[in-house]
Amino acid sequence: MMMLIDGEWTGSCSEETYEVKNPANGRLVDTAPLGSAEDVKRAADSAHEAFKKWSELTARERGKILFRAAQRVREKQHELAVTLTMEQGKPLKEARDEIQGFANILEYYSGISAALEGRAVSLANGRHGIILRRPIGVCGAIIPWNVPAIIMGWKVGPALVTGNTLVLKPATTTPLTNLSLASILNASGLPKGVLNVVTGNGASVGEEIVRNPLIKKLSFTGSIETGRRVLQAASSSMKRVTLELGGSDPMIVCDDADIKKAVEGAVHGRFYNCGQTCTAVKRLYVFESIADEFVRKLRGRVERLKVGNGMEEGVDMGPLNNRAQWEQIKTLVDRVKEKEEGTVIAGGKVPEGETYKNGYFYMPTLVTDVAPDSALLKEEVFGPVLPIITVKGLDEAIELANGSKFGLGSSIWTNDIEKIRVACERLESGVTWVNQHVKLPPEMPFGGVKESGIGRENGLETIDAYCELKSIIT
């Protein structure tokens, strides 16, 4: 597999490569170039050169290219999903859904492209104003390994439709799907240099994207710790920054909730993608009057989940993506047991058997009686572990839910309109779902409050982040 720079497939300047392995069995999937700062500089120069002609096209013309790419992605959905499952680990059904989601995002930005040119305003005393949107220039994007296709769409769609060019860095463990999607975009009519993909590690490729003076805008998705470093480094050149830095989403189940629906919501919300989703349910608050019934049914449902290689039929949950993530989850649960920070009522171990010996598998885990100072409640747990906390009512649930440095997503499960109103007003999060969790249609802006990030992705709201606004007053 090669990098995409200046519309050409190329290796790294050093000609070094690294291996991409299947997290379910450790087998080699492919190799990718180990890119360097010099490769990023080449890509940024190419994007800078391509910017003038690309930005001179109308937004509608750019949107047509995105639409063609979306159609071709749909035609290759299965092929792309297989690649995604093999490098990331998620079940094939989830991978198909993610590829479809990427196409949906491109279609959305294609659909709104005709409305992006600007607007006129009537002013006092018969004067008029015109607000113009102009692209910023070369943009940078750094994406993680958990949902690499969707997050690529969040960055590529608005950046390109507004007339910017882009240098994108995939995660080291999941570059193959991103490179394949870039190839489809390129073949759908993107001029040379508009979209460049440089593979490699954060210390060289990521650092150069953050610091390169030709790159005027950066969108980063990752951890809080890395996000802080990105923000600090970008500030030296006043680079515009959008940061999506993860979360610890609370799910509140009220006493009038549809228990069957809420149980399914908790299972999907926590164990989808092996729990490796920024907006996954990571803290579950249940009213005490229904807690026993709810926990019993949830435990039964979780214990029926099939764990295995995502390419196998009927698998509900694949492996964690990499060894570091697997070790982090295993160590965390072991500590909970050793320090008696909670009671593990399901999972809490590595599955046994020949199927699992070479993969990063961990059983879906439920923990009750969680200590208030446990890392399960204080940190982002990026894996299949769900702490359950019993509360007396909505006020207590909201207070505990808000007692976190994170503020990405949240959900309320109830049929009471007043409870919905109170929760939506008081929960400190960028997104609040009602009787559902996780789904993020491209029409809706997405991002967090507090330490969960800066700015928004998706929707019309992200467009201005990729534009310079110019006011003309006559």
Image: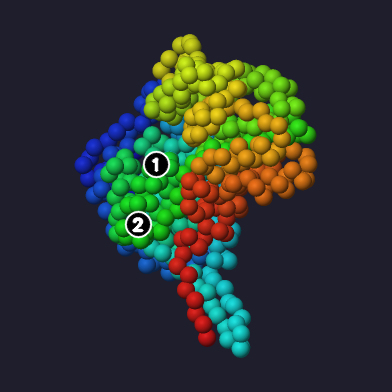
Residue 311 seen? no
Per the model, the C-alpha gap separating discs 2 and 1 is: 16 Å
Q: Position of residue 228 (x, y in %)?
A: 39, 47
In terms of secondary structure, where does tag 1 sit?
helix
Q: Which residue is mark 2?
A: 235
Residue type at numbered disc 2: Ser
Q: Residue at x 40, y 46 (%)?
A: 227
Q: Residue at x 42, y 61 (%)?
A: 164
Q: Residue at x 36, y 26 (%)?
A: 28
Q: Which residue is mark 1?
A: 225
Q: Position of residue 417 (x, y in %)?
A: 78, 45
Left or right, 253 with reference to 269 = right
| Vertical side of 365 occupied by 254: above or below | below
Q: Residue 288's image quarter?
A: top right
Q: Earlier in the sequence, mark 2 or mark 1?
A: 1
| Vertical side of 398 occupied by 242: above or below | below
Residue type at numbered disc 1: Glu
Q: Pick the quarter of the image with the N terminus.
A: top left
Q: Residue at x 58, y 46 (%)?
A: 429
By what rule are the colours in the image chosen?
A: rainbow
Q: Nearer the viewer, residue 167 or 28?
A: 167
Badge 2 density bin: few <14, some 14–19, many ≥20, Cα 10 Å: some
Residue at the outermost bottom position: 125
Q: Position of residue 88 (x, y in %)?
A: 45, 32
Left or right, 408 with reference to 289 = left
In terms of secondary structure, where does tag 2 sit?
helix
